[in-house]
Amino acid sequence: AQSVTQPDIHITVSEGASLELRCNYSYGATPYLFWYVQSPGQGLQLLLKYFSGDTLVQGIKGFEAEFKRSQSSFNLRKPSVHWSDAAEYFCAVGPGTNDMRFGAGTRLTVKP
Amino acid sequence: GAVVSQHPSRVICKSGTSVKIECRSLDFQATTMFWYRQFPKKSLMLMATSNEGSKATYEQGVEKDKFLINHASLTLSTLTVTSAHPEDSSFYICSAQPDRPEKLFFGSGTQLSVL
């Protein structure tokens, strides 16, 4: 069965610092991997996705993620965090957008 | 970009009443729509998948008689929480998928509070 683990429930970083959010998955085949961001009381916005090809994926708002098959990971990174990046981040895995499974989320707090 | 409108954004109702939540794809036809439930500080749980013109497919543990889903057109799916109780209070989110399976667009969610 497919599953997603986001080990960090809450992360706090200073504005301007780099960020890495961890995501590990369990999936029987080559997965489709996604990162979404959710602001309070809002729906989800897609940051980036990986289907195939280059394992380093660029997304919106300066985010990137790297697919590492050997580690079953798809960590999200940003070189310099902005205060507006404070939100909840979800990693998801699936055979596509059908039947996606979401991680529990990581809440990002940005200190001034 | 594609827009999915979800309405209402917030609803408060008395226990025992039914609540209908609408999910509309505004600028594309959605062959498939998904409904999720999100508890505070928790992840999204897929409740059901609805395809236009057919019965919804419910995930294990989701009561289909409790959460009625209708996908009557390619731009509209509705979720009706029947005889709502306080334990049904949650954040409900829909998403819509156009004909390209790798695309998925989310609504802004509905906060349901049952008193």
Image: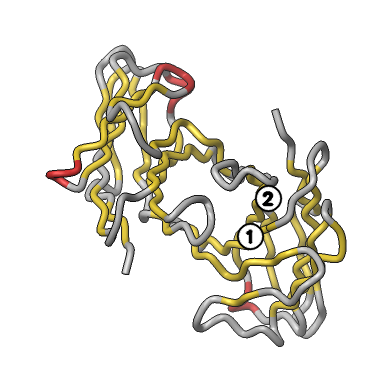
Mark sitting earlier along the chain (2/1): 1
| Amino acid type, residue under disc 2 in the picture | Ala
Residue B27 position within the rendered picture, expressed as x and y whole percent measured from the top left:
82, 36
Furthest residue toward right: B73
The residue shown at (42%, 59%) is: A101
- Report the amino acid beneath label 1: Phe
| Residue under the image location 25 percent in, 58 percent down | A26
- The residue under label 2 is B96
**Residue at left offset 63%, top offset 75%:** B57
Near-viewer residue (B106 or A9): B106
User: How many angstroms separate mark 2 from mark 1 (CA)?
Assistant: 6 Å
Q: Position of residue A109 (x, y in %)?
A: 36, 32
Q: Secondary structure at mark 1?
A: strand
Percent x, y of residue A37: 48, 37
- How packed mark 2 is, by other alpha carbons closer than 10 Å (few <14, some 14-19, many 20 or more), is many
- The crowding category of the residue bearing disc 1, from other C-alpha atoms within 10 Å (few below 14, some 14 to 19, many at least 20), is many
The residue that mark 1 highlights is B34
Is A12 on the left or on the right of B51, as rendered? Answer: left
Quarter of the N terminus of chain A within the rendering: bottom left
Pinpoint residue B20: horizontal percent, then vertical percent.
82, 68
Query: Which corner quadrant of the image does residue A50 belong to?
Result: top left
Q: Chain of mark 1?
A: B
Evaluate if marks 2 and 1 touch, with contact meaning CB atoms under 8 Å apart: yes
Name the residue nearer the viewer: A33 or B107.
A33
Is label 2 on the same chain as label 1? yes
Kindly identify which chain the residue marked by label 2 belongs to. B
The dot on residue B111 is none
Q: Measuring 44% from the left and 25% from the top, which residue is drawn there?
A: A85
Q: In the figure, B5 relative to B71: above or below?
A: above
